[in-house]
Amino acid sequence: MAMWIVYLITIVLNLDLSRMGILPRNMIGILGIISGPIVHANFSHLLSNTMPLLILGWTIFFFYSKVAYKSFLFIYVLTGLFVWLFAREVYHIGASGIVYGFVSFLFFSGIFRRDNKSIAIALIVTFLYGGIVWGVLPGQKGISWESHLFGGIAGIITAFIFRKIDPPKQYDWEDEEDDFDVDELEVSYDPEKNKFNL
């Protein structure tokens, strides 16, 4: 994973790459839309984003395979763009905005699509990650709540755009016609044995 490689480079070479983050409304800082999510402040910051990205990313690629790559790109770019346009003028780093985008995409896909599969996934995601909603509120020192908020908004937009793609799978047994035809059934009655013969 790119963010682990970047983090190892910062440790080995003792670098501070925070200036690769998003610096809102600054032309140099716009490059952070691409580089910001792969830069992390420390190991715990990196670790806290890694597992949700893996779990949620796998869920999107498994259940919404037709739109997975596009969804990832939309969430990645939209989150960064919104942060660059509207966030505080400080460097914003880390992939937590994408995590919020993934959670939001999976949850709102259930709402917009209204099929059983998507609703079930939305409920599971709510159970596992519902508590992160508090991360969109300002006031936590050193936390880019704007990335969380705009990641969530990017996820909603993406879920709405792709709501009609990747319909629920139709299983073979749902399309099969019943092999048993009542009209072709031959039945005879044997009065001596007092039973019906098929």
Image (cartoon, rainbow, N blue to C red):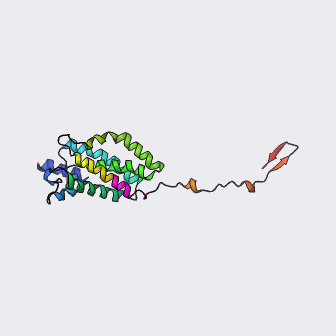
Q: Residue furthest front?
A: 86
**Residue in the foreground of this view, choosing between 45 and 164:** 164
Q: Residue furthest right?
A: 192
Residue 117 coordinates in the image, percent (x, y): 46, 49
Q: Which of the 4 image quadrants contains residue 135?
A: top left
Residue at image location 27% in from the left, 51% down from the top: 150
Q: Is residue 17 visible?
A: no
Residue 70 coordinates in the image, percent (x, y): 34, 59
Total marks in image: 0
**Residue in the foreground of this view, choosing between 35 and 6:** 35
Residue at image location 30% in from the left, 44% down from the top: 51
Q: Is residue 152 visible?
A: yes
Q: Which of the 4 image quadrants contains residue 43?
A: top left
Residue 127 coordinates in the image, percent (x, y): 38, 40
Q: Is residue 85 magenta?
A: no
Q: Is residue 158 magenta?
A: yes
In the drawing, does residue 35 fall left or right of residue 193?
left
Q: Which residues are magenta?
A: 156-166
In the drawing, does residue 27 fall left or right of residue 98?
left
Residue 176 coordinates in the image, percent (x, y): 60, 56
Residue at image location 39% in from the left, 58% down from the top: 162
**Residue in the foreground of this view, choosing between 66 and 101:** 101
In the drawing, does residue 93 fall left or right of residue 70?
left
In the drawing, does residue 28 fall left or right of residue 186?
left
